[in-house]
Image (spheres, rainbow, N blue to C red):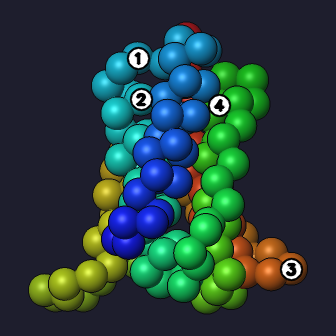
Amino acid sequence: MCNRNTPALALSREVLRSAMSHVGFRPDVIADAELALAELIVNAWRHGRTASPVVLVLVLGRTLRVSVGDDSSDLPDPRPPAGLAESGRGLQLVQGLTHRWGAEPQKRGKLVWFELDHAA
């Protein structure tokens, strides 16, 4: 991670935490979402070759959707890495921390997203 990008990560996490707190998500769920967001941002830097990924935080009814856009059109492989691969486990982490995740091609690059449902 480059030092110049660290403030963007901190700001994105702060916005996410604020939005989730505002609608009443539990602190442990907020912490999970922050970790998942950090993973998507790091992936955008590392694999998407994007210095300033676009982060979108939406609350849609009882569902939180977080999207991170990068400049690469390469969609992530949803399958876990084989054997003892040293990379590629971040999306497994995102899958374990969230209710749903996916990736969508865009006119330029892609959006990788995750969703969390607010408990009733």
Does 73 appear above or below 21? Answer: below
The residue singled out by tag 2 in the image is 30
For the point 69% across and 48% down, which residue is it?
A: 56
| Dot 1 or dot 4, earlier in sequence | 1
- Mark 1 vs mark 4, foreground winner is 1
Mark 3–mark 2 distance (CA, rounded to whole Å):
31 Å
Residue of label 3: 107
Kindly indicate whether the residue at mark 2 contacts the one at mark 1 (C-beta within 8 angstroms): yes
Of mark 3 and mark 2, the one earlier in the sequence is: 2
Q: Three-letter amino acid code at disc 1? A: Arg
Name the residue furthest front. 4
Residue 35: x and y, percent? 36, 47
At 86% from the left and 79% from the top, the residue drawn is 107
Q: Of label 2 and label 4, which has the lower sequence position?
A: 2
Instruction: Identify residue type, mark 4.
Output: Thr
Q: Is residue 98 visible?
A: no
Q: Could you say whether the residue bearing mark 2 is in a helix, strand or loop?
A: helix
Closest to the observer, 16 or 66: 16
Q: CA distance from mark 2 to mark 4?
A: 13 Å
Provide the secondary structure element on which disc 1 rests: loop
- The quadrant in which residue 118 appears is top right
Mark 2 crowdedness (10 Å alpha carbons): few <14, some 14-19, many ≥20? many
Q: What kind of residue is marked 3? A: Lys
Please name the residue shown 64% across and 86% down the image.
72
Query: Which residue is disc 4 drawn over?
Result: 63
Q: Secondary structure at mark 4?
A: strand
* Circle 1 residue: 26
Judging depth in this view, the residue of 107 and 76 nearest the camera is 107
